Image (spheres, helix red, strand yellow):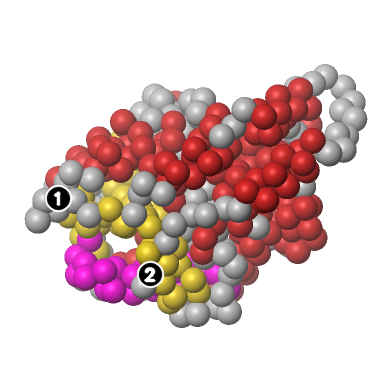
Amino acid sequence: METFRIAIPQTDVDDLRRRIAATRWPAMPGPDDWSRGVPAGYLRRLAGHWADGYDWPAQQAALNEIPQFRTVIDGQTVHFLHVRSPRADALPLLLTHGWPSSPFEFTRLIGPLSDDFHLVIPSLPGYGFSAPLGPGGFSLFGVARMWAELMDRLGYPRYVAHGTDVGSGVAGMLPMVATGRVLGVHLTGTSAGSPFDPPIDPAGVDPADRARAERFNQFLENGTGYLAIQQTRPQTLGYALNDSPVGQLAWIAEKFHEWTGEEVDRDQLLTTVSLYWFTGSGASTAHAVYDGMQAWKAFAAQQSGHAAPPAPDSPPVGVAVFAADTTIRSRMDPAGAIGHWSEYDRGGHFPAMEVPDLLAADLRAFADRLR
């Protein structure tokens, strides 16, 4: 295990600006809106700010104020943030991000939570400074095993796990690989179903959930293109993401537009995109999606016709649902077994960036029941 600092050479920053300036902009037929993807006018303005207004050295210096480390687990380089609380009895809290994001998604939670929690915030394999993907590829189960080993190495025998998006899958599997060590699992970024599910009949859900059902159906109809490409042709897509910063910008900015309920700070969004660009994570995360989906399909085929065994000593689960999410409790928790369930009228898929105050309070309320 070694300390780590971000040190992007100035030549790479200069190359980024040169490439943005040399962008070959495609024509956009029809109105300049989101009906066919990211609008040209919006992207030109955002790319212009990235090249001429955004201050990467200042952002890098701010990120380096957070203690960072790297280690190797199962042949995979794992980068993580580790902020220890001054409280001797602080509760360890493991935070796992999703796609298209990074551990720095959680920077606005560090201040509100670090007084009472030891924070461990890893980069998923193939993401950011955990790139490239190691020989084991990517699977939720494999990542959960890595995180359990990481917490062992840090000396945390018991801890709470939070995850969002694909990170929620990792957090959900941790109790299976770290039996008796996970005090509780807190989830955000969940959904009304998988991209392979049929549409939901809005008349078949509670009236309060119909808007979420309709939003999920819209996602199935016209929002899964990114997933279809990454789970089938990651290498083909990777050439474009690795060569064109504006292509990488569009690929990520579209999801922040579609999945959020609040406007994300422009420079924080560009920091996320910059990390993908400087580390070549666009291609490697596409491969991570491919590997993850292949592993999921293999697991689903293996379990077909067989009831999944209950997890031993399952810890309490908490779920926070934000305004732009599609999660419906009657589908996710039909038996009402989830003891902590919160719904908010603000925020969306990236609550740590959109509404960190709400997420911090929800995490604290959930963890207070476990102390």
- At which x and y percent is residue 2? 38, 69
Q: Regarding mark 1 in the picture, which secondary structure is present there? A: loop
Residue highlighted by disc 2: 2
Q: Earlier in the sequence, mark 1 or mark 2?
A: 2
* Residue 240, x across and y down, in percent: 79, 52
* Residue holding disc 1: 86
Q: Position of residue 19 (x, y in %)?
A: 78, 43
Say which residue appears at 43% left-offset and 76% top-offset.
73
Q: Amino acid at mark 1?
A: Pro
- Magenta region: 137-159
Q: Quadrant of residue 38?
A: top right
Q: Nearer the viewer, residue 293 or 254?
A: 254
Q: Are marks 1 and 2 in contact (CB under 8 Å)?
A: no
Which quadrant: the N terminus?
Answer: bottom left
The residue type indicated by label 2 comes to Glu
Label 1: how many Cα within 10 Å (few below 14, some 14–19, many 20+)? few
Can residue 46 be seen here? The reply is no
Q: How far apart are labels 1 and 2 at the CA level?
A: 22 Å
Q: Nearer the viewer, residue 133 or 29?
A: 133
* Vertical placement of residue 290 versus 12, above or below: below
Q: Which of pointers 1 and 2 indicates the residue nearer the eye?
A: 2
Residue 301, picture quadrant: bottom right
Instruction: Decide whether the magenta segment is chiefly helix, strand or loop.
Output: helix
Element at badge 2? strand
Total marks in image: 2
As for residue 145 lying within the magenta part, the answer is yes
Residue 28 place in picture, x, y as percent: 87, 28
Which numbered disc covers residue 168? none
